């Protein structure tokens, strides 16, 4: 667009050292690079790091970066505070007292590695690698490194974001959209083009549906919210679907203030309107879609009137907003975490994909384009799984194996609930070690956090690698390892576009990068694999050139014109060239992602034929893969397990809907709570309460209040605001207080303001996917002097006095297993059978019936 070209023309490119990656300026060494966590977030923005005397002193946005055009949020602008913070872990340490006492002794890296290696090898000999759990935080700069280490180094199949019931973050959308589309959809805001808004083919969306997220604050999944602001400035109209009034809702043609957890009902009603009024793209559906008749039948009764009663919306608003989206040329849907954090997760994802496909908005300029990781560098959560011994890999605690969920394996991750079951009950086998890398497990992902802590105390040996000492470190770790931050590491990342490299600028005491820690230990545990890489850069070059996670080099390059195309692009530059080459200086764009109408050009299918990367070659409105996973193949609504329709008897005591997890500008999950600037801007956790609701319950703005349900409670400061309605309150997640007492039972206050006190493990949607953590029920009331604090209640009983534990779906088997082991019976894990050691007779554990020889 002309405005973008004027912007480019107005930048003094020589003043910003175009084509240079490092230079001297006013006594500083300036490095042009990219930021990628730690500290958070999901995005990787172009930055200029100003270093003097071994410290980063200032951070600026890089105006020459085509991805973010010099824009930075406060997380990058305060990066120097993070890097230089005195509370950071400086050295490896071993626990010197009891867990929770916060007593440590400094040890060397070799001492730490020696103890870890000894423990791992001992577990391999006695229990097998499957008795080790490898945990990573949200998928930032460790989304392939840690899974590779877990599977190729620790030799365990049990890799997970532990504590997170139902894979309730990103996985439902990633896997759920691969089934109908074959690739992942993102809104086309020109981000795949190096010339961005000036690209001749690109157009902004006519209508943008911002559904269940706030992209300006979250910048989630490698997607920069400002890209969408540019579209709005170019005339894009907004539909906002959100319980909160956000920047998008204020500017929206329609703001649908939906009851949390009912989005699938709204999506089904939109499908009903678009099909019933024949607003869909008939020509596109006929040529490119399958499963239309099945979809039509499934949404025949899901009218706007039906959905309005469920969603607390006006049926005319539902109908009019559906028409606006359907008539857009093009329209686009920007979806968020709310899709994953409800029990209808997979059905909602499918409904979103069906809306995109029906209206002809897939694979077109300004719509939802289909992308892969840049240059097909796809080492991810399954990275290295073929390097785990098959007998240990067969015992992976996935949903099917651990929870008896019917259907094929959904994702490469182990089941978080399956891991919790094994830790609590030793079933189907005990867990002997946990490796936690950059995850504050207790403060952020763990649903039913007190239960998770109690369970983890059963694990004999826990290692925590993190930039800071966290509540998880103090409560549970036996060894802590200091992790380097982004300016202290060499790294590379690929998401949709472009491929980017980070270069090490400074050191911090003895902290090491995730890559270096993994490489050091990997050489000890599996030298045959890790020994081929001398340095971290060698490992990064392997990743860039063979990102499939195997050891066979990709040799066929993508035809950029799309004639015959395998969907793979050979990345030929080395990490060093990616950092320093004047034509790249840290980034490289993949033309595959920038190409439109790829299905017509044969770019999705390995044989180069026309079509999408699905079994049928079409956009599958009723995908076959859903059937394999044991899921319904068309969208549907599942009511949250507690609420006005499912449990009206509870609403007198718990009359409000509790939603949580909305992002703020200052924090990324549980990170940044140490930083002075962030805490000045956002000093305490805040719960949004409507003025009428606050008046009803005697709550003043700024007052500390309890948020409580029939499971637990937590406290936050009331922010009285009309951005939520009278029926809903919105709380913040990830809070702990690094300035407070670290030792048990207080543990930096991790339980005091944690909404996960009110969540439940083992409560999921269909197929064991999704959980209702954005649509719970609660009551609110002021905190009074003398109230018993959560940490006191948890220390006394392990949880809240009124806590109701949700048992594993295999609880009957667990009880039989426990009684049988007490009676001296053996257990055949793979057959799920009890064996009498004296007679060899077998009993099926699931049924309790004898097994015929």
Image: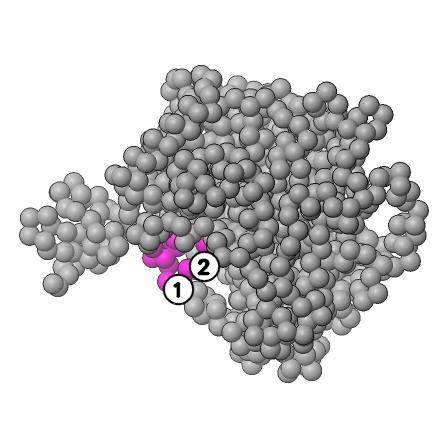
- Please give the name of the residue rendered at 59% of the width and 30% of the height, measured from the top-left corner: 484
Query: Could you tell me residue 496's position as x and y percent?
Result: 65, 55
- Please give the name of the residue rendered at 14% of the width and 51% of the height, measured from the top-left corner: 835
Image quadrant for the N terminus? bottom right
Asked whether residue 674 is in view, the answer is: no
Query: Could you tell me residue 522's position as x and y percent?
Result: 44, 38
Which residue in the structure is indicated by mark 1?
Answer: 407
Placement of 787 over or under 553, stated as above or below:
above
Residues at marks 1 and 2, CA–CA distance in whole angstroms: 8 Å
Which type of secondary structure does the marked residue at label 1 adopt?
Answer: loop
- 822 vs 110, left or right, is left
Which residue in the structure is indicated by mark 2?
Answer: 410
- 410 vs 43, left or right, is left
- Please give the name of the residue rendered at 52% of the width and 38% of the height, measured from the top-left corner: 534
Q: Which residues are magenta?
A: 396-413
Which type of secondary structure does the marked residue at label 2 adopt?
Answer: loop
**CB-based contact (under 8 Å), mark 1 and mark 2:** yes
Placement of 700 over or under 853, stated as above or below:
above
Q: How is the image coloured?
A: one colour
- 569 vs 152, left or right, is right
Q: Specify the label residue 370 is tagged with.
A: none
Quick check: is 596 in the magenta stretch? no
Residue closer to the observer: 139 or 610:
610
- Please give the name of the residue rendered at 81% of the width and 44% of the height, measured from the top-left corner: 19
Q: Residues within 10 Å of mark 2 (few under 14, many from 20)?
A: many
Circle count: 2
Image quadrant for the C terminus? bottom left
Placement of 661 over or under 196, stated as above or below:
above
């Amino acid at each position: 667009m002309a405005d973008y070209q004027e912007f480019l023309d107005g930048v003094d490119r020589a003043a910003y050292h175009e084509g240079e990656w490092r230079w001297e300026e006013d006594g500083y060494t300036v490095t042009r690079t990219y930021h990628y966590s730690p500290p958070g977030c999901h995005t990787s923005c172009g930055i200029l790091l100003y270093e003097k005397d071994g410290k980063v002193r200032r951070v600026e946005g890089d105006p020459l970066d085509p991805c973010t055009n010099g824009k930075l949020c406060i997380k990058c602008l305060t990066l120097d505070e993070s890097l230089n913070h005195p509370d950071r872990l400086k050295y490896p340490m071993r626990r010197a007292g009891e867990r929770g006492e916060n007593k440590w002794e400094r040890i060397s890296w070799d001492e730490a590695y020696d103890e870890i290696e000894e423990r791992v090898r001992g577990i391999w000999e006695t229990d097998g690698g499957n008795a080790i759990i490898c945990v990573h935080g949200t998928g930032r700069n460790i989304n392939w490194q840690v899974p590779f280490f877990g599977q190729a180094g620790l030799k365990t199949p049990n890799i997970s974001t532990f504590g997170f019931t139902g894979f309730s973050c990103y996985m439902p959308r990633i896997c759920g959209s691969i089934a109908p589309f074959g690739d992942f959809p993102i809104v086309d805001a020109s981000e795949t083009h190096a010339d961005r808004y000036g690209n001749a083919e690109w157009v902004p969306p006519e209508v943008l549906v911002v559904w269940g997220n706030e992209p300006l604050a979250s910048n989630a999944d490698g997607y920069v919210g400002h890209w969408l602001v540019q579209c709005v400035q170019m005339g894009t109209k907004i539909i906002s679907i959100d319980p909160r009034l956000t920047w998008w809702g204020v500017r929206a043609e329609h703001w649908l203030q939906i009851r949390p957890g009912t989005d699938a009902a709204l999506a089904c009603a939109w499908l009903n309107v678009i099909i019933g009024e024949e607003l869909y793209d008939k020509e596109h559906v006929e040529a490119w879609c399958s499963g239309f008749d099945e979809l039509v039948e499934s949404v025949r009764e899901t009218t706007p009137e039906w959905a309005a009663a469920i969603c607390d919306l006006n049926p005319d608003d539902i109908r009019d907003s559906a028409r606006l989206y359907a008539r857009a040329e093009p329209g686009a849907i920007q979806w968020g975490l709310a899709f994953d954090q409800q029990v209808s997760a997979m059905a909602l994802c499918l409904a979103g994909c069906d809306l995109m496909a029906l209206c002809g908005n897939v694979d077109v300029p300004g719509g939802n384009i289909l992308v892969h990781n840049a240059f097909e560098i796809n080492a991810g959560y399954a990275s290295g799984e073929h390097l785990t011994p098959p007998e240990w890999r067969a015992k992976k605690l996935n949903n099917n194996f651990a929870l008896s969920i019917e259907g094929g394996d959904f994702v490469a991750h182990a089941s978080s609930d399956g891991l919790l079951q094994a830790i609590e009950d030793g079933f189907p086998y005990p867990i002997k070690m946990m490796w936690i890398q950059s995850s504050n497990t207790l403060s952020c992902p763990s649903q039913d956090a007190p239960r998770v802590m109690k369970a983890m105390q059963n694990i004999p040996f826990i290692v925590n690698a993190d930039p800071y000492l966290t509540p998880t470190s103090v409560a549970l770790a036996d060894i802590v390892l200091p992790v380097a931050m982004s300016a202290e590491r060499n790294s590379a990342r690929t998401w949709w576009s472009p491929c980017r490299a980070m270069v090490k600028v400074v050191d911090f005491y003895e902290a090491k990068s995730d890559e270096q820690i993994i490489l050091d230990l990997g050489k000890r545990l599996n030298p045959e694999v890790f020994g081929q890489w001398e340095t971290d850069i060698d490992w990064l070059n392997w990743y860039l050139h063979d990102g499939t996670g195997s050891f066979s080099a990709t040799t066929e390059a993508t035809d950029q014109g799309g004639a015959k195309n395998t969907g793979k692009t050979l990345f030929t530059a080395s990490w060093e060239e990616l950092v320093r080459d004047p034509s790249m200086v840290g980034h490289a764009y993949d033309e595959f992602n920038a190409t439109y109408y790829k299905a017509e050009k044969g770019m999705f299918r390995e044989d180069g034929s026309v079509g999408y990367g699905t079994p049928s070659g079409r956009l599958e409105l009723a995908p076959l893969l859903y059937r394999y996973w044991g899921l319904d193949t068309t969208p549907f609504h599942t009511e949250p397990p507690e609420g006005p329709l499912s449990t009206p008897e509870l609403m007198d005591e718990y009359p409000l809907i509790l939603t949580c997890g909305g992002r703020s500008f200052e924090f990324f999950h549980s990170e940044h709570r140490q930083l002075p600037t962030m805490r000045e801007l956002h000093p305490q956790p805040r719960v949004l309460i409507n003025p009428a609701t606050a008046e009803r319950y005697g709550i003043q703005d700024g007052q500390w209040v309890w948020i409580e349900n029939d499971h637990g409670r937590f406290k936050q400061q009331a922010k009285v605001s009309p951005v939520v309605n009278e029926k809903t309150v919105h709380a913040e997640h990830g809070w702990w207080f690094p300035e407070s007492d670290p030792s048990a039972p207080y543990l930096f206050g991790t339980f005091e303001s944690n909404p996960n006190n009110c969540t439940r493990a083992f409560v999921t949607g269909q197929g064991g996917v999704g959980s209702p953590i954005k649509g719970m029920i609660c009551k609110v009331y002021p905190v009074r002097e003398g109230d018993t604090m959560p940490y006191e209640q948890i220390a006394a009983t392990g949880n809240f006095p009124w806590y109701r534990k949700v048992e594993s779906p295999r609880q009957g088997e667990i009880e039989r297993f426990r009684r049988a082991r007490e009676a001296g019976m053996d257990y055949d894990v793979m057959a799920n059978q009890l064996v009498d050691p004296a007679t060899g007779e077998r009993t099926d554990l699931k049924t309790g019936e004898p097994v015929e020889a």
